[in-house]
Amino acid sequence: MRNTFVDCLMERAKIDDRVFVITSDMGFSVFERFRDTFPDRFLNAGISEQNAVGVAAGLALSGKIVYVYSIIPFVTMRCFEQVRVDVAYMNTNVRLVGVGAGLSYGPQGATHHSIEDIAIMRALPNMTVCCPGDPVETRQIVNQSFDYKGPMYIRLGKNGDPVVHTDNCSIEIGKAVKLVDGQDVVLITTSNMLAQGREWIEQWTEEGVAASLISMHTIKPFDVEAVKDIISKGIPVITLEEHNIIGGLGSAVAEIIAESGTGIRFKRIALPDTYSHCVGSQTYLRDKFNISSFDIKSFIK
């Protein structure tokens, strides 16, 4: 996803001098092409995320479309006051781009794990929250972001994320995408859990369970109608995310189900409300926190 993001910036910057990139002493192997090609539109603000966001807001008010890039905890939490006041409150065209969704930086420990970011960002008025699930979604969301009005948070996985969609699929900010259609259960995923969701669907099919797979690549504005359509059919729903079980995709879906007044079977699969006091690969930590497998037969019986 990371390289796809930079490729999109390069393509647009060649024809749009509003595109500006700010990084906090990060991503030099990624942004060298942009820096060398557009030196007047690239700024390394140093390890000073608060200043980076403040500068970005000022540039946005002067007409630029500014992309602030860093590891997710640093671009969302370390500078949260500036994000809230200078970006969200001022409704500026700043795009906060975080890399390392969920447990992507597993070996680096809790400081680099991003398990609260969706909850934090979706609570900000004016903030659009996009969580692409593969490079295809990343490309289309980033390309739409150039002309999107207001602040945006784009949550990226890491480099080397598998492609799940076909290249000719259509992605629209704020609209869920159905990849597989089934009548027994609906699995809704977001961000870097899309590939695992696809694997589960294939496994469940072999077990005789016909499941739908929906990618909810935008958490805000949320596709309420997509969830209401599922509710109207009475189909059980499962949400899957690499994020705290509080405040993310599962919470957003639960809010709609609760307000519908209709009881359907519902299960949130997410990280528990705790910090990881151990380190390890993303695969290891997914196993440890029980988000790498699910007994579908027990759920729907």
Image (spheres, rainbow, N blue to C red):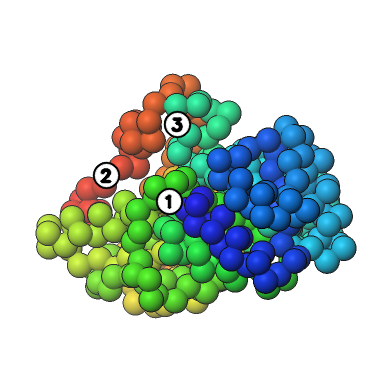
Viewer-closest of 90 and 95: 95
Q: Quick check: 137 above or below 170?
A: above
Q: Quick check: 251 above or below 116?
A: below
Left or right for 17, reference 160: right
Q: N-terminal of the two: label 2 or label 3? A: 3
Q: N-terminal of the two: label 1 or label 2? A: 1
Return the residue at label 1. Answer: 192
User: Please, what is the three-letter code of the amino acid marked with disc 2?
Assistant: Ser
Viewer-closest of 204 and 135: 135
Name the element at disc 2: loop
Provide residue 300's location: percent of width, then percent of height: 23, 58
Name the element at disc 1: helix
Left or right for 282, reference 58: left
Q: Quick check: 212 above or below 94?
A: below
Rendered residue at 68%/35% (across/down): 25
Which labelled disc corresponds to residue 106? 3
Rendered residue at 55%/52% (across/down): 155
Rendered residue at 50%/76% (across/down): 225
Q: Is residue 104 visible?
A: yes
| Gap in angstroms between the C-alphas marked 2 and 3 | 18 Å
The image quarter containing residue 214 is: bottom left
Return the residue at label 2. Answer: 293
Do residues under tags 1 and 3 come within 8 Å of each other at their CB atoms? no
